[in-house]
Image (cartoon, grey):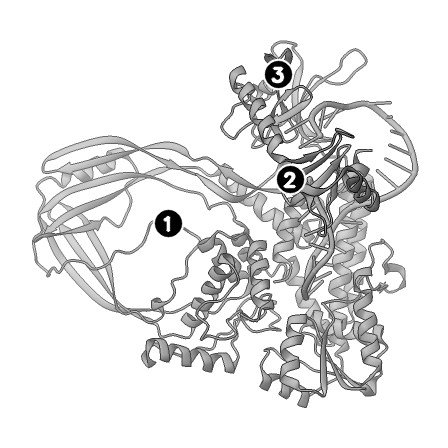
Amino acid sequence: MTKNLVIVESPAKAKTIEKFLGKDYIVRSCFGHIRDLPKDSNAVDIKNGYKPFYKVPDDKKTVVKDLKKLANASEMVWLASDEDREGEAISWHLTEELGLKENKTKRIVFHEITKNAILAAIENPRGIDMNLVNAQQARRVLDRIVGFELSPVLWKKVRPSLSAGRVQSVAVRLIVEREREITSFNITTYYKVKAEFKVKDKTLVAEVPGRFDTDKEVEAFLNSCINAVFTVSDVEVKPATRKPAPPFTTSTLQQEAGRKLGYSVSRTMTIAQKLYEDGHITYMRTDSVNLSDFALAAAKMQISGQFGNHYSKVRKYTTEISGAQEAHEAIRPTAFEKLKAGADEGQKKLYDLIWKRTIASQMAEAKLEKTVITISNSKNKESFVAEGEVIKFDGFLKVNIESSDDDDENQSSGLLPVVNKGDVLPCNHITATQKYTRPLPRYTESSLVKKMEELGIGRPSTYAPTITTIMKRGYVLKDKREGEIRSFKVYNLKGDKLSSAMKSETVGAEKDKLTPSDIGKLVTDFLQEHFGQIMDYHFTANVEKEFDEIAQGLKLWTNMIDAFYLPFHQEVDKTIANVEKVTGVRELGIDPKSGQPVFVKIGKFGPMVQIGETSDDNKPRFARLQKGQSLDDITLAQAMKLFDLPKVLGDFEEKPARVGLGKFGPYIQHDNKFISLGKDDDPYKISFERAVELIVQKRDSDVLKRIKSFEEDANMLVLNGRFGPYISFNKANYRIPKTQSPSDLSYAECLEIIEKQPAPKTAKKSR
DNA sequence: CAGTGAGCGAGCTTCCGCTTGACTT
């Protein structure tokens, strides 16, 4: 007979807590939510007060069974799920599903996994807060209604299998709008003027603070500087400080790992999960910047020991993001004396980032000395200004400098040469460089997360999955963009000689930036037009206010849902009944050969170009748009070019080698085999020789891939794939059990493996 | 894997937020 059963959400947490509590307690985890609305569309009884119907999903059945057994055998069950809306609901679902009696159930909460916090929680148990549970039910039901009523509208009016929701649709909107801002951005040019002065054996570079808009203005200014006398008119030295950033939350960790380590949001989370499971860091899904008293003391000790007392400064941070639920601590190392941790290079780097950020957050501010030198010009009102910054005391900069999203080149320079007011400075030369104005950058995964967090959309546990969803639906893609070469003008004034030259630079090279697809734009426009309320950037913030009122017992959750549902559902019905299917059709012009109109639109299989309308005596021609092409801006010439392929390049071994554009990009087809073109191959320009080279290469790599083939049947192969060896039989793939060695398999053994395994998905789909 | 684009109809898709493994070709 167990005395006490404690239930927490995460298994790693359970292990830690069990150590704190001693033998009278066993601690188990429920692995998050144990019940949810099932997938069928009747999970919410709308006519009956929105009564939700909950079900234990299959993969949670054993968890629930085990917990039930333990609960029945315990004198007291302590529900220790997180202290937020979702956590309260988890405790309530556990109560219901495990059939817990009130007199032997207690609800406890803590925000940090420290012995003191847990003992204090046990001293202060409470009951389940049904108001908070109801706020969660409102959240859950609202999301279900929005998602499961809007998505079918898209299936009917745009394309099957699409999805819409409170979070994902707004995330896509952000990306669509940013793209349109970039496309419509009006690039203008201006000049920045810099001068290099001689100060004894050193040089001082100073800049005119403003801009010059035209060649004429900048030339006039530079000409006026000929024979000018430059005098130091002011030297200002003032102290400045810089403070460390707060410790990591999920969102800021994703941002820093993205910028500094190049990790995707989901990669960061997978790695953090490992560090957490191995006990190196605290929980990685959190919106709190709070550090426990234990952590504050431990950080202080570490900093004092490693850097000295004067580097330590205890700082308590408070969360400013609205809608934060703060069930956990910030993400921090569990033991600061561990300077390194992690099982591989990826984990080590992420741990290092977390260690530095947390330690820095508890360190003294950096003390700087900022110097501003102003240099006047005897012939002109424009002064030159030089700014420099000198670190007097490094403080937290000793361990950490956080990066920023705008990777501009505006780093302030270091130490400036010493000058005094009234000094006359000889000028080496003055340059004016042409600059281009720039639109806001495209979102990266992590800058999107940052924006979503600001808007209160999504939660730490959903940032990564949301990004996966909008990419999987094809709304958004991660693009790699080659830079373009752009020329700019540079003037140089040396002595009394003004010259100019053209230079060039590569700009706009991007990788891992999010861009919307045609379908993403189309769906966003459609939803904006008919469901503006859901697409409003403040929609989530507004409903959060109402959830809070429900949590405080000021409002009935069913009333809130009722007020939302009636008008929303009407709009859904109206849209289904009255609105035409959208295709994003655009006429590009007339095909010069056939005289027929050329259109682009979203077809059954995605964006396509079509020549001519369908009629009894006309069969239109079709071609799919290529990667990087968009309905919005493809030209007639580009569209017509798509019809040049496929074409035969020549015969190789008496069989034609064809080049074409397929679903997966450009390919060579030869002898019933398809070979993807290389990155640098242009399908329109590729030579026959290059095609043959690719065909031969493919044969070689196929041989390398082959581990074993059999005389009995040429269709049976043991191959080496991305996930290790596998069996390929009649174009279907089968896993090889870990107990068997792939290279030693006999034909009979292969057949046996195939028989034991269920028909693979690929075989099913192809039917 | 590398095609397809008539029209009809059956049957399917879909949300957000808690948690980890199982699984992928």
Question: Which quadrant is the N terminus of chain A positioned in?
Answer: bottom right
Asked if labels 1 and 3 share a chain, the reply is: yes
Q: Amino acid at mark 1?
A: Asp
Residue A517 percent across, percent down from the top left:
61, 38
CA gap between label 1 and label 3 equals: 49 Å
Q: Nearer the viewer, residue A733 or A222?
A: A733
The residue where tag 2 is placed is A720
Q: Nearer the viewer, residue A232 or A728?
A: A728
Residue A499 percent across, percent down from the top left:
17, 31
Tell me, for residue A657, which label it has, or none: 3
| Circle nearer the N terminus (1, 3) | 1
Q: Dot 2: what SS?
A: strand
Q: Is residue A314 visible?
A: no
**Proximity of marks 1 and 3: CB atoms separated by less than 8 Å:** no
Q: Chain of mark 2?
A: A
Whether residue A209 sits left or right of residue A75 in the image: it is left
CA gap between label 3 and label 2 equals: 27 Å
Asked if labels 2 and 1 share a chain, the reply is: yes
Q: Nearer the viewer, residue A338 or A56?
A: A338
For disc 2, the neighbor class at 10 Å (few under 14, some 14 to 19, many from 20) is: some
Query: In the rendered image of this protein, does residue A41 appear above or below residue A646?
Result: below
Q: Dot 1: what SS?
A: loop
Q: Dot 3: what SS?
A: strand
Query: In the rendered image of this protein, does residue A98 appear above or below residue A707?
Result: below
Residue B10 percent across, percent down from the top left:
92, 38
Tell me, for residue A408, which label it has, or none: 1
Q: Amino acid at mark 3?
A: Ala
Tell me, for residue A416, which label it has, or none: none
Q: Chain of mark 3?
A: A
Query: In the picture, residue A114 is in which quadrant?
Result: bottom right
